[in-house]
Amino acid sequence: MAQTGEGLAPNEGGGGGTGNGGTGTGGGAAAPGANSNVVQNTFVVSSGLYDVSATQYPIQFDPGVPNRQYSYTGPTALLTDTFSGSITLLSQVGAAAPTTATITRTGLTMDQWVAAIKSAFGSFCIPYVFKSGTTGYMAILSPFQPIVPGSATDITLSITALSITDDDNPNLNFQFVPRITNSLGIQSTGQYGWAMGIRDLTTGHISNMSPVATVSTMLYPSEANLTFNASQHYELNNQVIEVYRTASNGSSLLYLGIAAFNTGNVYTFRDTFNDDFLNPGIVGPIAEANDPPPQGLFGMVAHSGSLWGIVDNKVYFSGGPDTTNGSGNEAWPPSNFFAFPGQVILILPTASGLLVFLKDDIHIIRGVDSSSYYPDMWLAGFGISNPQAVDYDGQTLYVYTTKQQLHAMSQSAQHEIGFDIGDIFSASFPAASTNLTIHRGSSLDYALYVSNGSNTILRYDPRQKSWSPKSQPLMGVGRVNSLETSVGVNTLLLGTPTGKPNGLFRRDLTVWQDNFVSYTAFATIGTMMVAEPGATARFEYVAAQLKAKGSLPSIFVLNNEIDSTVVPFTQVFRPVPDPPDLPPAQTLVARRWYLKSSLTPIPEIVNTVQVKMSFPAENAANEVLGLYLRNQP
């Protein structure tokens, strides 16, 4: 009377059966989405199980285990006792050659019964009598040596019917059960359970265990045949099906072996092993300990020996070093998470702990392992609006906040490095799209780059604590990122924004074009004070020193004004050598532009001045080495 487990929750015990032949099946599907890497298919445990509640006692001689012995058990039988009854035995050599013999005898002693069995089955079994004084025990021994699994020969001997009683004592019955080798002791009965899991041979990870199939009140060593109808041939994906079993009356699933693949995607395993063969060091994962990552996981980082990721307002972490069987990076127990009061935008590992960025605040998860992790508030009011608004350089954290402020933070202090250009950030750098990256190319190429995700890049030098003129590449600006493209070589990369043709560009310090197209460039210097407050000076000309590369810039001035959108710049012309009496240089160009060369009159009595230098579109390494104003008090 076999039983089948149906509708089982993940990893719960499934079906177990007792009865004729001792069969049990375990099945049932896992909860949808909760345990997607569990073996879902039903498998069957059957054959050769001694069941004390049965009326028949099947004895299987497994060819894979030589010298299998079965012994009579029951009240003490004297060698001189006589027994009457019948016994039916089945021997099989090859799938289509069964031999059945029924032996019926009256008034035979144990020795005579042995002779009768041997006569009926010849070399297929070796019956004999254990003698201990006047007490006798009958045994049947399988003499066959192991054969290769899957070969054409399958040697089986079983007792399928038994009705033998003592002539003098009708309560003394034969029962043939597995016997401990070289001992008259009989194995005790117990409950056993089997489960299976998928092992990935590439990563070493194993799935959660399938539902458990159980058979109770069974003796071991005996024989259990496991059959599993798979949905695929796992070995083609570099995977195998591992079989686990509990010890007698145990609860932990211990490693037993690997199931064999057969045609039709059927896997089989023949279990003839006692508890000593089980590996207590390899325990089958249950209770969803080896779950796959939760659906929607993103933003994964490595921290404190585990992988961490985000789903909505929760931060999950993998089993890591707590995973006893499988890959700690692929096992995600569903209880391994922390919840926060808002959408988690980014997680970032640091020496102080795992930083958790929300839109309003920054939290931190401290601790070194799953037993000591705990969340805490780190900085209130410093949240971010997109995951690219943070970069980490050494022990310095750069953060562009939801409030459109750019901060540099370390363990000792925090500074708003974007304060000097806060008006530019507020006007042109939305919190939702601004992204930043630290680029360490060399001592001459080290800076923080900030993109507004549309058309502008700003460059900040952490050593000089200064900002360069903004850059507006012709192809637009989406994401900027500095990546190590070869060992020791970092490349500053730019991706085009939404609405522009897709492209990925790299910065090349030997090229002065945007995607092979020359661009214009200009810089506004000032406002500069040329006289003390409340005083004036006579402003005569602008002078500049440049590398002898490309064209001379056009020079514009704006005197005593600060907003060129209201009062425009005025261009000055006809540059002359500076100073006029020096011979021309080959690598340096020094020129001065007099105000009186302007086509429009410019006031020469000034207090403040702005100067604009504008270069034409050309593929040249234009570089300004210095600029000064000539004035008379």
Image (cartoon, helix red, strand yellow):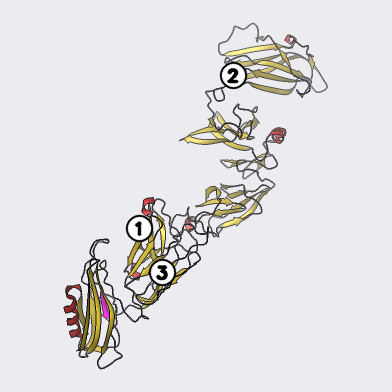
Q: Residue 498 appears in which quarter of the rendering?
A: top right
- Earlier in the chain: of badge 2 and badge 3, it is 3
Q: Nearer the viewer, residue 574 or 105?
A: 105
Q: Position of residue 226 (x, y in %)?
A: 36, 66
Query: Where is the N terminus found, in terms of image quarters?
Result: bottom left
User: Residue 31 vs residue 25: left or right?
Assistant: right
| Label 2 neighbour load within 10 Å: few <14, some 14-19, many 20+ | some
Residue 61 lies in the magenta-colored region: yes
Query: Where is the C terminus found, in terms of image quarters?
Result: top right
Q: Residue 435 appears in which quarter of the rendering?
A: top right
- Earlier in the chain: of badge 1 and badge 3, it is 3
Q: Secondary structure at mark 2?
A: loop
Q: Nearer the viewer, residue 603 or 160?
A: 160
Q: Is residue 536 visible?
A: yes
Pointer 1 and pointer 2: residues touching (CB < 8 Å)?
Answer: no
Indicate the amino acid at tag 3: Thr
Q: Is residue 459 above or below residue 601?
A: below
Indicate the amino acid at tag 2: Asn
Residue at the disc numbered 1: 264
Indicate the amino acid at tag 1: Gly
Residue at the disc numbered 2: 622
Query: Marks 1 and 3, how far apart in space?
Result: 20 Å
Residue at the disc numbered 3: 25
Residue 21 lies in the magenta-colored region: no
Mark 2 vs mark 3: give the one in front. 3
Pointer 1 and pointer 3: residues touching (CB < 8 Å)?
Answer: no
| Label 1 neighbour load within 10 Å: few <14, some 14-19, many 20+ | few
